[in-house]
Amino acid sequence: MTALAGWQNFYVIVGSSAGGLTGLQFVVMALVADLPLTRDPQTAGAFSTPTVVHFGVVLLLSGILSAPWSGIAAPMILCGVVGAAGFVYTAIVMRRLRAQSDYQPVFEDWLFHVLLPFAAYAILMAAAVAARSHMAEALFIVAAAAMLLLFIGIHNAWDTATYLVYVRRPEHRKNSEPPR
């Protein structure tokens, strides 16, 4: 029995949640498809795409850590690689957030689109390093990173949906009404 055996239910629940929420993102995008496109193509790359990426990473981590590995080294190395890739991706998101011109980001945007994802991906890399000497703790660290990414995605999905419904949709209705 490997160290991962006790984590199967956790990753089934977390992975299923990430998969379901990713699907809901696609539904939301289809429902708001009648809204005019943003003026700046960087906007989707800064606000919408990262949410799907974070959900995808949680789903990927769940798959990695639910697979029937014969040891723990390979999945922990993969967690480190995922963390490093996520760290680089978050730097790209930060650049897109600065470059886009549709919306002026506030602190909450920086927190949930840059700072917390950087922390989550750094935690994944740290877990991979810690696994060599503190395996049990490292598995909890990976779980914490997965949960953080899941909650970041939930927050960002909700934030995007409310922005589209309460800001963009009224603007669209106002601009598409015939003059009286």
Image (cartoon, rainbow, N blue to C red):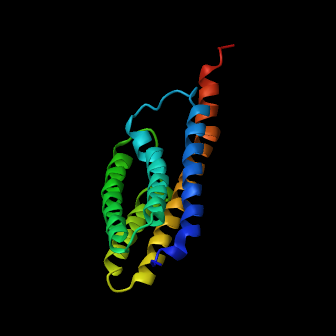
Which residue is at 44% across, 55% downward? 113
Q: Residue 21, relative to residue 100: is it above or below?
A: below
Can residue 4 be seen here? yes
Examine the image and state in which quarter residue 99 appears: top left
Residue 92 on image: x %, y % = 32, 51
Quadrant where the C terminus is found in the figure? top right
Along the viewing direction, whichever of 146 and 51 lies nearer the viewer: 146
Direction from residue 168 to residue 106 in the image, left or right: left
Q: How many numbered marks, from 0 up?
A: 0
Examine the image and state in which quarter residue 123 appears: bottom left
Direction from residue 24 to residue 124 in the image, left or right: left
Residue 32 on image: x %, y % = 59, 32
Q: Residue 161, relative to residue 77: is it above or below?
A: above
Along the viewing direction, whichever of 107 and 159 lies nearer the viewer: 159
Residue 154 on image: x %, y % = 57, 55
Direction from residue 6 to residue 49 in the image, left or right: left
Can residue 155 be seen here? no
Examine the image and state in which quarter residue 122 appears: bottom left
Direction from residue 79 to residue 33 in the image, left or right: right
Which residue is at 31% across, 77% downward? 129
Which residue is at 31% across, 63% downward? 81
Residue 65 on image: x %, y % = 45, 66
Along the viewing direction, whichever of 88 and 15 lies nearer the viewer: 15
Residue with the most extreme right position: 180
Residue with the most extreme bottom position: 133
